Amino acid sequence: MVATDNAIYVSEKAKAKVTKLMEEAGIIGDPSYFLRVGVVGGGCSGLSYKLDFDNEAKPMDQVFEDNGVKVVTDLKSFLYLVNTELDFSDGLNGKGFHFNNPNASRSCGCGDSFAV
């Protein structure tokens, strides 16, 4: 991935998993739903990532679309997530969504927590 804009990016593997999860939730094809990405306090490195499906945008939300996936984040979280790529791994060394975040100064072994 090469960051060209101030955005949030979605890998092919993450897109496939998001699509599958939306199908399982019965919301695939509903244009009002999107993937909400955020940052919350906590975790072993100080900040943790949060993912969820949502259909209610808020006034200060930042909206992106990459690889056919609509991604929305609040403005405060975006400051930590600018040019981050959402990826998915189903390998033996850690299954699940991972954030390739160029803004993180360190992250924990689980990949769910980071510091700036």
Image: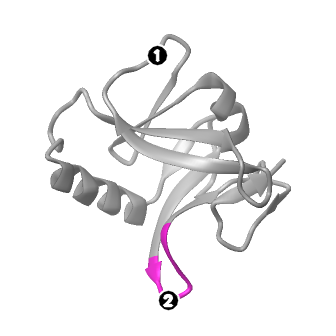
Q: Is residue 29 left or right of residue 4?
A: left
Q: Tag 2: residue type?
A: Leu
- Range of magenta residues: 90-96
Residue 65, placed above or below residue 47: above
Mark 1, residue position: 58
Residue at the farthest bottom position: 92
Which residue is painted at 14% across and 39% down in the image? 29
Q: Tag 1: residue type?
A: Lys
Q: Is residue 49 magenta?
A: no
**Quadrant of the image occupied by residue 28:** top left
Q: Is residue 60 left or right of residue 71?
A: right
Which residue is painted at 71% across and 74% down in the image? 109
Q: Is residue 95 magenta?
A: yes
Q: Position of residue 115 (x, y in %)?
A: 81, 52
Q: Position of residue 90 (x, y in %)?
A: 42, 78
Q: Is residue 94 left or right of residue 29?
A: right
Q: Is residue 75 left or right of residue 103?
A: left
* Dot label at residue 109: none
Dominant secondary structure, magenta: strand
Mark 2, residue position: 92
Which residue is painted at 56% across and 14% down in the image? 60
Residue 79, placed above or below residue 81: above
